[in-house]
Amino acid sequence: MENGQAASGALTIAYDAGSRSYTISTAGRSATFAPADLVESGSPDFISFEKLGTTSEALTLTRPGTSGALTYRYVGGGAWERATVSGDQLDFSYDPFTYGIETPDTSLARTGTGVYAVSLVGARAMEAPYAMAGSGTLQVDFLSGSLASSGVLTSIDVGTGLIKGIGVYFGEASLSSTANNFSGDFFMDDGTRFTGGWAGRFYGPEAEEVGAAWHLTSADGQVAAGYMLGRQDGTIEPVNWTLTPLVFDQGFAHRFSELSFTDLGGGRSADNAELLRSDAYLGYDADTATYRYLDTARGIDMDFSPAQLVAAETDARLAVYSFTGSDGLTYRLTLNQPGAGNPAIQLSYASFGRWERAQASASDRIDRWFTWGIRTNGFQIPSGTGEFAGIIQGTAARFRGGPVYALSGTSNFSMDFAGGTFTGSLNPIGTSLSDGATRDFGTFAFARGAIDLDAGLTADIVNNNNAYLGFFEGALYGPRATEVAGSFGMQTENTDSGGAGSSNAAYLSGVIVGTRTGN
C-alpha cells in the first residue's frame, strides 16, 4: 500500500423518487446508482449497488428499520467505493458518510445527557483493503457540548473472513452551541496507533439517533475510514466526566497503600507497623449519595451514607463518615472535597480517600490511603512535557514503636509525555499525634517513573544514594491530564542488607494529589 490518505470532506447524497436512484457527489466526483445496478449485498443489513467498467464503482447503504445494530429509523450510513486497476496497481477510494432526517437546530436539546449504543463500519488499507466493524457507546453532555465515544474496532480480511486486528477506539468532540453538528479527534490502537478525526450530527425529531463519519492515519502510512451509527439506549449507564459534582452511579477501582500497627493509645502511638499495597474499589450511588467501600480479597464490604457523615469533622476540605459495625469496631471513610471551595487544593477530576478500621482484640488497627477519580483516557495523554505540583496526605509510624504521625508536605512531577517517563520528588512532613511535634522526614526522589498507555503512573521512591525505599502508583486525571494523583508507601531507611533500621526510622503511607503548573 502506497500513498494512502484519510481526511474529512463534504459529500452530498440525493435521492430521485421518480427514478429510484441515488446520486453521490464529493471532491469533484459524481456517480448515480439506479435499480438496474442493484446486486446481492450478502447481508440483510445492507443494500448494494455495483457498476463495472474501467473504473468499477459500488454504493452500499444500510437498510432502514427500527431495531438492529445497523438498521435505523432516522439515520443511515453508506460508502461509495471506486476502484481502477492499471497493471499491478490498484487505485482505490472509499467515501463513507451518514445521512437522514436531521434533528432541527432549534429542536436539539441544550441540557441533559444522552447515551447511545453505536456500531461502526469502515475500511482499512494495509497491504490491501480490509473491512472494519465495531461497536461501542457514545455519551453527550448537551449543556457543555462535550461528546465522547469508545469501544472496539476490528479489521477483517474480506476474502478469508479472518480477523487481522482487534483494537480499541476513542473519539472526543465538541457540539456546536447553535447548530446540530459536532467534530473532534478520533483514535484507534490495535498494536498500531492511529490518529484522526470525526464529524457528525443527531437525527430524529428529538435526537433519538446519531451518525458520524471518521478517518484515521498511522505513522507507518496505514489509513482507515468509516461511519458510526447509533440510537439512544436507556440500558447504558452514563459515566461522570468530572467530580464536581458526581451525578451518576460509578465505580472507581484503585490501588491503596495501607499501614497497619498495634495501637498503643487512641491512634497516637504505635508498635509493629507494617506496609501493604493492593487493590480495592470505591463505588458511588447517585440516588442515595452513598459510597461503597469494597475489598473482596480481605472481606471488606461496607456502605457510608449521608446519615453517617460526621458534621463536626466535615468541612470544605474533607468529608468524614463514621459508624460502628456489628463487630463493635469503628470504621471511617474520609474523602477529599472536590472543587474550587477546597482551601487545601482545588481538584475537579482527581481525589483521595482514607479508610480506617479501629483495632480489634486479635488484629491491628488499619489505616489505608487511596486515590480515585476521572482518569485521563490513554488517547488523551498530551505530547511534550508537563510540570505538576502536589500536596501529601498520609500516616507514618516508627519501625520500633513510638508516635504516629499525620503526614503533610509537598511533591512535584516532571512528565515527559512523549517518552512515557517522569521524574520528581516528595518531601513528607510529619506531625506527631502524641505531642504535636513536627518532623521533616526528608526529600526523596522518584526513580524509573513510567507513564503507561492507559495513563497509569508507577515509580520507585529512592534516597540520595538511589537506594530503593518504596513505591508510587497513580495516574493522570482529567481530559487533558491536568491533574495527577497516586498512593505511596515507603520506609525512610534502606534495610535491604538485613539491618533493622535506626530507632528513628519510619514507615510512611499516603497519597499525593496535584495539578499541572506548566509545560
Image (cartoon, grey):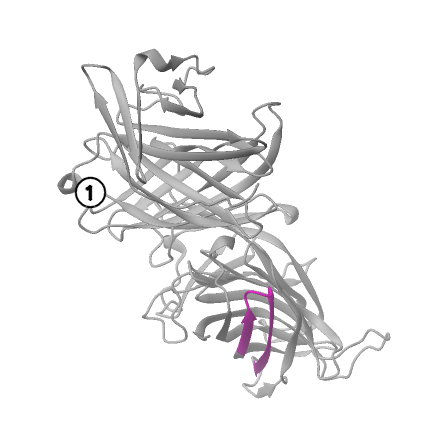
Q: Considering depth in this image, is 262 or 143 the residue closer to the camera?
A: 143
Residue 374: x %, y % from top left: 44, 56
Q: Is residue 272 above or below residue 442?
A: above
Left or right position of 306 against 437: left
| x then y, percent, for residue 232 | 32, 33
What residue do we see at 33% from left, 11% from top? Answer: 36
Q: Quadrant of residue 394?
A: bottom right
Which range is magenta?
411-431
**Front-lying residue, 76 or 233:** 76
Q: Amino acid at mark 1?
A: Ala
Circle 1 residue = 109
Outermost left residue: 106
Q: Does the magenta run of residues contain 423?
A: yes
| Residue at the spot 35% in from the left edge and 70% down from the top edge | 316
Hey, which quadrant is residue 366 in on the image?
A: bottom right
Residue drawn 20% across the image and 42% down it: 109
Q: Determine the residue located farthest toward the front in the rendered image.
A: 87
